[in-house]
Image (spheres, rainbow, N blue to C red):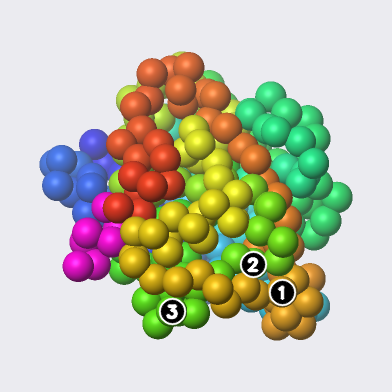
Amino acid sequence: MKIVICGISGFVGSALKRFFEERGDSVIALSVRSEISVETIAQKLEGCDVLINLAGANILGRWTSEYKELLRQSRLETTDKLVNALSRCDHPPHTFLNASAVGVYDAYHQHDEFSSHYGDDFLATLVQDWEYSASNAQSEQTRVCMMRFGVVYANGGGAMSKMIPPFKLGFGGKMGDGFQMISWIHLDDLVRACAFLIDHKEINGVVNFTSPEPISNLEQTKAMGRILHRPTFFDLPAWVVKLAFGEGSIVMLESKEVYPRILQDAGFAFRYPTFDSAMEEIAHVQG
């Protein structure tokens, strides 16, 4: 297959590139910078099988008004441009996988893809707008899947690259009260789930990319301490997180309990369904 990836240089994009190339697919990097015309993008997409859009500035940061604008622009303008380009193709990709996030859900309910309990904050609104933009690509020729990512864990990048060093130094601890639920996925399962969606053409719309077993921040902290053989006494109070990240602290402090009903009902088998299994693999790779 010919697979086009927008955002290929990132943590997830580079893993997808490795996976698809190893199985013999042709992978094409796509840049959607402002100076690149819609016509040029359409030419790259013409006759390809799959488009995967991962573009977007890192959600983890201090949400100043300028950074909020960057978060929106890097997602919405890029996606609008891709949708526009797809509409100009005579033979567009049959599958468009667009990144999204579990940040769309509220902090008070359990969620699967059929949940209508959305948050009312900046992130939830951004995700809804982003998905609406991507959904405009749905046509008789192209199906669209919105991949709502949980926190992505793996060795060598992403959230774990920030979490493990303080734990190894003995400075690990829970964040806030520790009761907030974390919906997460191992990078290996995320990549395999992308391939699963491509192969299962009956699936479209929203798909939660989360492990079947979300975990509380407190339980996650205990598991990391146990597996890394380190103490976990250095708790990070909520006020410190809020001081450092402002409004963006909700990414770390708000509960998200999300389940991957669509993937499980379709028969997807997670290699790392529990946080312990994921952490054991990550710690093993780290040595």
Mark before the other along the chain sequence, 2 or 3: 3
Q: Quadrant of residue 71?
A: bottom right
Mark before the other along the chain sequence, 1 or 2: 2
Q: Residue at 76% across / 36% down in the picture?
A: 109
Mark before the other along the chain sequence, 3 or 1: 3
Nearer-the-camera pick, 194 or 219: 219
Q: Which residue is mark 2?
A: 175
Q: Secondary structure at mark 1?
A: loop
- Give the quarter of the figure containing the C terminus: bottom left
Tell whether position 240 is magenta.
no
Q: Quadrant of residue 24?
A: top left
Disc 1 residue type (three-letter)? Pro
Q: Which residue is mark 1?
A: 237
Q: Which residues are magenta?
A: 281-287
> Badge 3, how many Cα within 10 Å: few under 14, some, many 20+?
some
x and y, in percent, of residue 17 in the image: 27, 54
Disc 2 residue type (three-letter)? Met
x and y, in percent, of residue 117 in the image: 80, 35
Q: Residue at 19% across / 42% down in the picture?
A: 25
Q: Which residue is mark 3?
A: 170
